[in-house]
């Protein structure tokens, strides 16, 4: 079972995405900011990370840069409300594989995850 870390400072958003992932057959865990995400991701490997940008203590871009210093291959999807091109460029420069603007439909999110994992759509 693939393990996904959801990093978002909003407990409601974090729980929403974790529930989508769990009901779709993934193991999912949450972190409320980049500091907690870095601690969790370095102590236990994840197969994919969903990460917001704006968070207290350590923002998503800083987390991604620090994480990429030790782990180059784990796919990272930025999931944020920031839709400006400059933010997308910063996200990809930090090491994200995909940049998705919230809100995102659950089916769309799952499709992006399946694409990164190379899983065929099962519908």
Image (cartoon, rainbow, N blue to C red):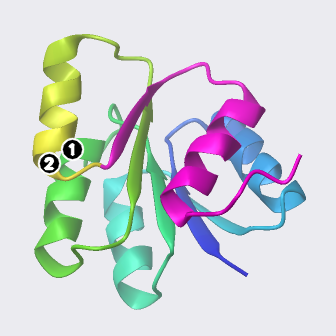
- The question of residue 6 being in magenta is answered with no
Whole-percent x, y for residue 8 in the image: 50, 43
Crowd around label 1: few <14 · some 14–19 · many ≥20 (10 Å): many
**Residue tagged by mark 1?**
61
Give the magenta range.
Answer: 97-123
Q: Which quarter of the figure is the N terminus placed in?
A: bottom right
Q: Looking at the image, do the residues carrying marks 1 and 2 touch, with CB atoms under 8 Å apart? A: yes
Q: Distance between the residues labelled 1 and 2?
A: 6 Å
Q: What element carries label 2?
A: helix
Near-viewer residue (47 or 31): 47
Q: Quadrant of residue 91?
A: top left
Whole-percent x, y for residue 95 in the image: 19, 53
Does residue 9 lie above or below 27 as drawn?
above
Residue at the image position 46 percent from the left and 59 percent from the top: 49
- The answer to whether residue 59 shows anywhere in this view is no
- Mark 1 or mark 2, whichever is nearer to me: 2
Whole-percent x, y for residue 111 in the image: 66, 43
Q: Residue 117 carries which label?
A: none
Residue at the image position 24 percent from the left and 56 percent from the top: 63
Near-viewer residue (120 or 94): 120
Relative side of 96 to 92, left or right:
right
Crowd around label 2: few <14 · some 14–19 · many ≥20 (10 Å): some
Relative side of 9 to 76, left or right:
right
First in sequence: mark 1 vs mark 2: 1
**Residue tagged by mark 2?**
94
């Amino acid at each position: 079972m693939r393990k996904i870390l959801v990093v978002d400072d909003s407990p409601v958003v974090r729980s929403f995405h974790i529930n989508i992932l769990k009901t779709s057959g993934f193991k999912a865990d949450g972190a409320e900011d980049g500091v907690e995400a870095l601690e969790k991701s370095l102590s236990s490997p994840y197969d994919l990370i969903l990460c917001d940008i704006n968070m207290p203590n350590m923002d998503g871009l800083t987390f991604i840069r620090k994480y990429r210093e030790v782990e180059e291959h784990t796919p990272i999807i930025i999931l944020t409300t920031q839709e400006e091109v400059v933010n997308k460029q910063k996200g990809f420069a930090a090491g994200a594989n995909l940049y998705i603007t919230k809100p995102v439909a659950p089916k769309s999110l799952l499709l992006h995850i399946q694409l990164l994992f190379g899983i065929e759509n099962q519908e």
